[in-house]
Every structure is written in C-alpha cells, then in structure tokens.
Amino acid sequence: MYSKETNCVHNRQQHQGVNTPVYTSTANRYRGYDEILYPRNYNTENQLAIVDKLCKLEQGEAGMIFSSGTAAIATALFSFLKAGDHVLFSQDIYGGTMKLVVEEFPKYNIAFDFVPHAAMGNIEQMVKENTKLIYTETPSNPLLAIVDLEAIGAIARRKGLLTVVDNTFATPINQNPIPLGIDMVVHSGTKYLGGHHDLCFGAVITSHKLKDVIYQSALNYGGSLNGLDCYLIERSLKTLALRVEKQNASAMKLAEVLQVHEQVQKVYYPGLRQHPNHAVAARQMKGGFGGMLSFELKNPMQTEQFLDKLELIVPALSLGGVDSTICQPATSSHASLTEQERLEQGITNGMLRLSVGIEHVDDLARDLTAALE
Ligand SMILES: *Cc1c(COP(=O)(O)O)cnc(C)c1O
C-alpha cells in the first residue's frame, strides 16, 4: 500500500508509457477479443486508468467515471431505486442534486425527505418501511456542516439501507467515507479532482458487488466520458494531493484572518475550534479540513460592493480549482429558493462562499481585507 501522494502520481501500467496513451477509437475489432471495447462500455484504458487511481485514493474496490458529477449521481441513484421506494437526503446538498431529486423522482414514484443537517444524528427515526437509501454530503454546501459518517454507516447497516456520500468538497485526500462504513462515494470531478476549471466529469467508487449493479444501469443511461478528457484528468490527479494540501493550509489561515475581522459576522470552516462539529470533522477528515469556507459580512448590503472590490479572487460559480473563486449563494447557487427558505437553512444574503486556490495565502488575505475595508 502506497501513500495517497504516491497513488496520485502512479498508474496501473499495461503499456510502455508513463502516461496512458489517449485512445479515441469508437470502432474496435471484436474477433478474437473477449471484451467489446467501447467508450460507453466504460472499459477503455483511459477510463480504467482513472478509475484505478480513484479506487486507491478512496479505498474502494471498484468504480466508474462519468461525463459529469450529476451523471454519476443520477446513475448511482437510479441503479438502485424503483417505484415505491423512499430516500433520505440531508438538506444542505448540492443544488443540482436537489433539483434532480425534486424534479425527476416524482415521475418514477420515488418518495424522499430532506433532513436538516442538525437532525442527521436522529435520522434513524425518519427511516420508513420503504426507505432504501441515505444520501448525504459532508462538509455541506455552503454552510460547511459536518455529518458523522461512521454514525450514518452504522444506522444504515442496522436498518439494511444503502448509503451514498458526495465527497466532492472533502476530496479523497482529506476524507474517505468507505472505510467509515459508507457504501458508495460520488464525486463531481469537475471540482477538486479536475482542479483547473477546465473539464467536467464525475465518479462513483464502491464495492465490486454494487458496482456491478451500477454498471448495468450505466450502460443504459450512457453518461460515459471521452478519452481526451480522461487524459486531462489523469494529468490533474497527479497533483491532487499537492493542491489539496496547499488549499487546506491556506483555507485554515484565511478562516483565522476572517474570523477576527471587524466587518465579518461569522466564519464557517470545520477546521476552526468554534465550528459546532469540529471534533467530528477532526476525526473523519484525516487529511485536513478542505479548501472551502463561507463567511458572513456584518453588513449584507455591502456584499456586491465587496465582490466588485476584489482584485484577485474571482467572483465565479463552481469551485475546487487552482484559482480562488467566490460567490454569494443567495444570488447564485441558492437563488432558486425563496428568501424565507434560504433563511430557514441559515443562508443569509451576506453569506459568501470562498473556494481557496493555490495562490500565495498572503496575497489572498490582502485581497480579502482590502475589499472588506
Ligand atoms: C458541482 C457539484 C456536483 C455536480 O457536479 P457536475 O460535475 O457539475 O455535474 C455535485 N455535488 C457537488 C458537491 C458539487 O459541488
């Protein structure tokens, strides 16, 4: 067993190259071959090289990659759900996942409930006769709330439920849900795994047994990825540990700077001792607390002015790349909710979500404090 840093760099080698040659053929000879090679069979060497790396990083037996995080999530969910089933989701999940559930599940008569993060500890009481699966995200978006994965895994095993964790925010460098008892890990690779704001992909990592089920549905849904994107992902993954370690350290420092700033009302970062679930985060985020943090301005009226004053940090959606980006959830990722719904979840108008890049942390701190003044 090698360390994560090493597994980021090295690949399974079935060819002479240090990197996997890009294989783009969609028509492949079949006579004399056991397996039909085809991108939508998820079996090209470029796809498998990435899956192999992600399995090692997440400590899973098997996995698949898809053309987006959403394709990975939708395929994983619909592989196991059928009409009449019920699913429990933690409330503070990625907006696109919530949209998928709210808009698509009713068409197939699949029921669901959203559980506030604060109530995740009591989720057992919300399990129904027909509950099939628990889906959660930790740290959550944009409040960086923490769910105790070991506890969720234990409840699910007791009740015979499947568990899915979206590990996008944490990255496999910081957190591995599978050894904590979670069945399936999903990623929007568009974020940290890709890491350069220039490609879109998703992944599911799980056991051989569950992967075989997902695979059969994935053939039908067809959300496969092409060889050229795979080549970029393979390159990106080589620096994943380096990038994330830097982002962890810088986010921690910036959280500390913001926390004592007089224009800042509150900072949300699981690495801070003041975070209500810091102890759980410290237990399950072994590599670090991640590169995402949120904060609230004292004067929410000045949020847009603040964004305009930033010179370095880019007001942009998406996250997890080498460039630091920032957004106001109330007018972007959570704009489809009413103000009342947002406030119920704790998302104020003055809240900003910062994705810390790999620039020098002093430059980032100066940019933030200059704009706050
Ligand atoms: C972006 C994101 C997704 C969706 O991924 P896409 O690659 O955009 O489809 C899912 N979960 C989280 C936490 C995300 O940040």
Image (cartoon, grey):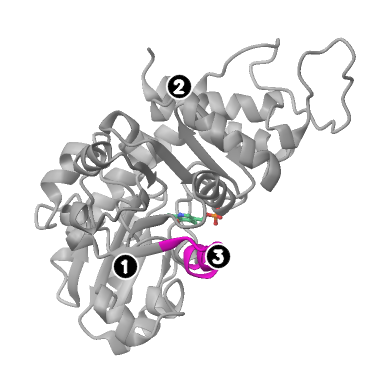
Asked if residue 27 is positioned above or below residue 105 in the image, the reply reads above
Q: Is residue 209 left or right of residue 41?
A: left
Q: Residue at x 69, y 27 (%)?
A: 43
Q: Tell me whether circle 1 and circle 2 mark residues in contact (CB < 8 Å).
A: no
Disc 2 target residue: 7
Q: Is residue 181 left or right of residue 256?
A: right
Q: What whole-number distance in Å separates the C-alpha atoms at marks 1 and 3?
A: 40 Å
Disc 1 target residue: 368
Mark 3 nearby-residue class (10 Å; few <14, some 14–19, many ≥20): few
Instruction: Looking at the image, tell me whether mark 1 or mark 3 is earlier in sequence order.
Output: 3
Q: Tell me whether circle 1 and circle 3 mark residues in contact (CB < 8 Å).
A: no
Residue 353, quarter of picture: bottom left
Q: Position of residue 305 (x, y in %)?
A: 38, 84
Q: Residue at x 34, y 64 (%)?
A: 113
Q: Is most of the magenta stretch helix, strand or loop?
A: helix
Kindly report which numbered mark, 1 or 2, lies closer to the viewer in this rendering.
2
Q: Position of residue 101 (x, y in %)?
A: 48, 63
Disc 3 target residue: 104
Give the amino acid type for the residue marked by disc 1 in the picture: Leu
Residue 104 among those drawn in magenta: yes
Q: Nearer the viewer, residue 40 or 50?
A: 40
Quarter of the image that includes the C terminus:
bottom left
Q: Is mark 2 within 8 Å of ligand 1?
A: no
Residue 58, quarter of picture: top left
